[in-house]
Amino acid sequence: METSTLLGLYRDMWLIRAFEQGLEREFEKGNVPGMLHTGLGQEATQAALAWHLKSTDAFFPDHRCHGINALAQHRHGGNGERIMAELFGKATGVCSGKGGSLHSADPAVGNFGDNAVEGSYMATVLGVALAAKMRGQPNVACAIIGDGTVGRGEFHESLNMAAIWDLPVLYACVNNGYAISMPVGEGHASADIVDMVQGYGFESRQLDGNDIVEAWTVVGEAVEHIRSGAGPYFLEFKTWRWQGIFAGEFRPEAEVKYWKEERDPIMLAGETLAGRGVAPNDLEAVEQEMTGLIEEWIAFALESPEPDPAKATADVYVGWEVDSR
Amino acid sequence: MTAADTATPKRTARTPRKARDRVRKVAFTRALNDALDLAMAKHDEMFVIGEDIAEMGGDFGVTKGLLAKYGPERVRDTPLSEAAIIGTCAGAAMVGMRPVAEIMFADFIAECYDQVVNNVAKMHYMFDGQFKAPLVIRTACGGGFGGGPHHSQSVEGWFLNVPGIVIVAPSNPIDAKGLLLASIDSDDPVLFLEHKALYRSRAEVPPEYYTTPLGQATVAREGSDVTVVAAMRMVPMALEAAEQAAGSGVSVEVVDLRTIRPYDAATVLASVAKTGRAVVANEAPRIGGLGAELSARISEECFADLKGPVVRVDGLDTPIPFSVPLEDVVLPDAADIAAAITTAAQY
Ligand SMILES: Cc1ncc(C[n+]2csc(CCOP(=O)(O)OP(=O)(O)O)c2C)c(N)n1
Ligand SMILES: [Mg+2]
């Protein structure tokens, strides 16, 4: 990988981290309604996926994907602040505040929206992929799911149909070790999800989701494979989420220490860059620049107006109006 | 809402307690926890099952402590597999077990809807009484938290058209405990709805085992001019509206349904026959919901007693938006019930 590419990914990872840390702070202050799940600790996985997906592709993000949503919005739409505003429930958000953290979508940048009923879009992704295939478009349809979500019946239904129809689906399974509190090895027949996928007969691979070089390289190969019409691809990213159960920590101290202190994906990428001669000041500058950008987005979200009350009854149907009170 | 928000509130015992504070005031979640504990001690064939319910005690803390007391065979964590959770309960119930499932948010029941509607609810009927399905599905429902479209719904309407299922919907901690114990005792399948806004409400809950009968409404406040029929969170709102109405000389009777299906029509109709005016309050969207059923039934059966049309208070006919100001537009509140009381009282 070129150093310039690695530096670009380093920026992306910092964008995600600054986004999530800023969001956590604002959530604590009560500025962000609802529930908050962050992608902290999973920045390499997310940056690698966001890098290779085009605005003409489709991705279905899960509840930890603010970072991917923000990167896609920033890169393809030039308005990443609209993801932040959505999380604040503001009129300037990508769904005018109607969706929030668990339902942010903007098809113009390839974001087909989360479904807070975990894993339901494992089925939806098939249709997006089928349409691309029927129309002869070289598009990738990507479903991003956690290890816990593998428990859903749709997981099987989706992999099976993608296989028999050779659909252009990228399955990105983010194995961070746990569902909410359920360890992956206790919730599934195998702690290695790729083992469960073998029988479907298409390409699958497990990789280090905290190593940005590996993640970027493997995602690139998988996307290339799918675009060439060679069928679905399943990737299992081994990673770890910094967030425990909401704010609470339930995992062994040594495990927490290991992942945060030795396996921090940004730290690891920083070390690689330093090894290639990038000056500490230049790395520091990336962090500062991204933190500054995110503070601008937060200010934008805070200053944005609440949605117009008329929005509450708008868009239930395309062809009908709905009564207000 | 976070797990931290809904954890059993800490006691603050610094200030000297007034006499009335000496009585045990217990949160709704704790009352449910008590009920599960007492029922597990009573029924050897009972087990609880769901996502993160064992060590973690559930997203809202309702199953806390059960694992330590009853062990992992009877307090069973599952993967994220709602259809298989309810399927497991259904099969176990067919052979005489008494499972109590937790579906973390009621919205996720859509994932096991087939199990509930086509299997659990019909099993006793279609196999000519040879199987029973004595299971309970506990689930957290309702809005008001910025939870957005998949964490805020009132799902009773999804099941109102399903004969064979019992829908229980408590409005306060005392009933919550008694109704849950009665639900577990029942040989019919029960969908037990726990409104999230009520989880932290407190009352003097008797510590001992008791049951509150299924299928029986209660008069939560007596009055003579207008009847308000409500369930769950609409009950405290109706009581608040009734209090306001009393200030302007309107005497309101509040009927708390407690069981939504099969519901206690006798109590509802007797109250409306007495007052001659009816308001039905319901958080879910208007069309085809509980309010629609109650309004139709009251209109049919109390036609001669009614002084005016039944007035309905419902959620708007929309999904629930994430934005809190928009959610406020969509969901009904005490002021909406008060306005409906004023409308009804004009006749
Ligand atoms: C169908 C459904 N069941 C349960 C939930 C509640 N829930 C939200 S996140 C989660 C765990 C998901 O675990 P995983 O897929 O590993 O994602 P992670 O949070 O670890 O990133 C659960 C059970 C849900 N949202 N949808
Ligand atoms: Mg996980």
Image (tube, coloured by chain):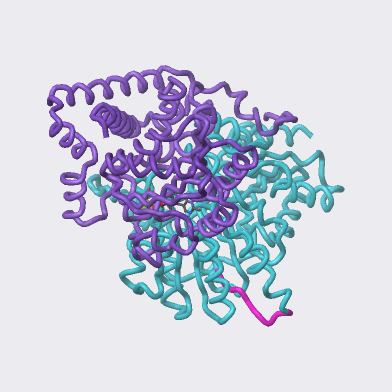
Chain colours: A purple, B cyan
For the point 62% across and 71% down, which residue is it? B188
Q: Position of residue A287 (x, y in %)?
A: 22, 26
> In screen coordinates, is B300 left or right of B114?
right
Residue B131 belongs to magenta span = yes
Residue, x 38% and y 45% (percent of image)? Answer: B2
Q: In which quarter of the image is the N terminus of chain B?
A: top left
Left or right, residue A269 beside residue B281: left
Residue A48: percent from the left, percent from the top? 35, 38
In which quadrant is the C terminus of chain B drawn?
top right
Predominant secondary structure, magenta span: loop
**Is any part of residue B19 visible from this angle?**
no
- In this view, A258 is above or below A135: below
| Magenta part of the chain | B128-135
In the picture, measured across the screen, residue B2 lies left or right of residue A135, that is left
Task: Give the side of residue B262 with respect to residue B303, left or right.
Answer: left
**Is residue A58 magenta-colored?**
no
In this rendered view, identify the residue nearer to me: B92 or B249. B92
Quarter of image, res B186: bottom right
